[in-house]
Amino acid sequence: MFLWTTPRAMKAFGTTPEFAQATRALAANQGLYNGFLAAGLLWGLVTGSAPVQLFFLGCVAVAGVYGALTSNRRILFIQTVPAVLGLLAVLLAS
């Protein structure tokens, strides 16, 4: 969220300084969104609430599918597959 224009972030995401600067607000928005997802997943873990875990893992999976369809298919394996595995684990444990 705050490191989008750093050399390390630009290298990780393959962006240029110009692109990083132009998309800084969008990256901050995405970072905030990801922070809320992380907080929700942590909340589900701490409380042990299967419905909370399922909801937030479902959000991650849906976002991964959308990202794979609109941006890069690699996202499917990086984001969606782990979320689906988490969903299955929660369902099997319930």
Image: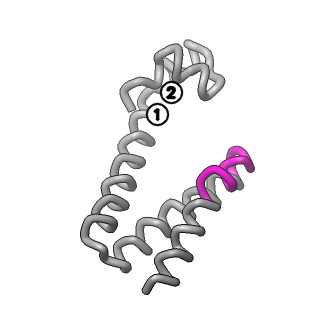
**Label 2 amino acid?**
Thr
* Residue 85 screen position, x and y as percent: 59, 68
- Residue type at mark 1 is Ala
In front of the other: 7 or 94: 94
Q: Which residue is mark 1?
A: 27
Element type where label 1 sits in the image: helix
Left or right: residue 5 versus residue 61 is left
Counting from the top left corner in percent of width and height, residue 32 is at 36, 43
Q: CA distance from mark 2 to mark 1?
A: 6 Å
Which span is picked out in magenta?
70-80
Q: Main secondary structure of the magenta part?
A: helix
- Which quadrant would residue 31 be assigned to in this image? top left
User: Where residue 60 appears, x then y in whole percent?
Assistant: 51, 60
Is disc 2 placed on a helix, strand or loop? loop
The image quadrant that residue 47 belongs to is bottom left
As drawn, the residue found furthest toward the right would be: 73
In this orientation, which residue lies closer to the viewer: 49 or 33?
49
Q: Residues within 10 Å of mark 1 (few under 14, many from 20)?
A: some
Above or below — where is 8 with respect to 77? above
Q: Residue furthest bottom?
A: 94
The residue to which callout 2 is attached is 23
Which is more foreground, mark 2 or mark 1? Answer: 1
Residue 1, percent across and down?
39, 32
Residue name at image x 37 percent, y 61 percent: 41
Residue shown at the point (56%, 13%) measured from the top left: 17
Mark 2 vs 1: CB contact within 8 A? yes
Q: Residue at x 28, y 63 (%)?
A: 43
Magenta run includes residue 79: yes
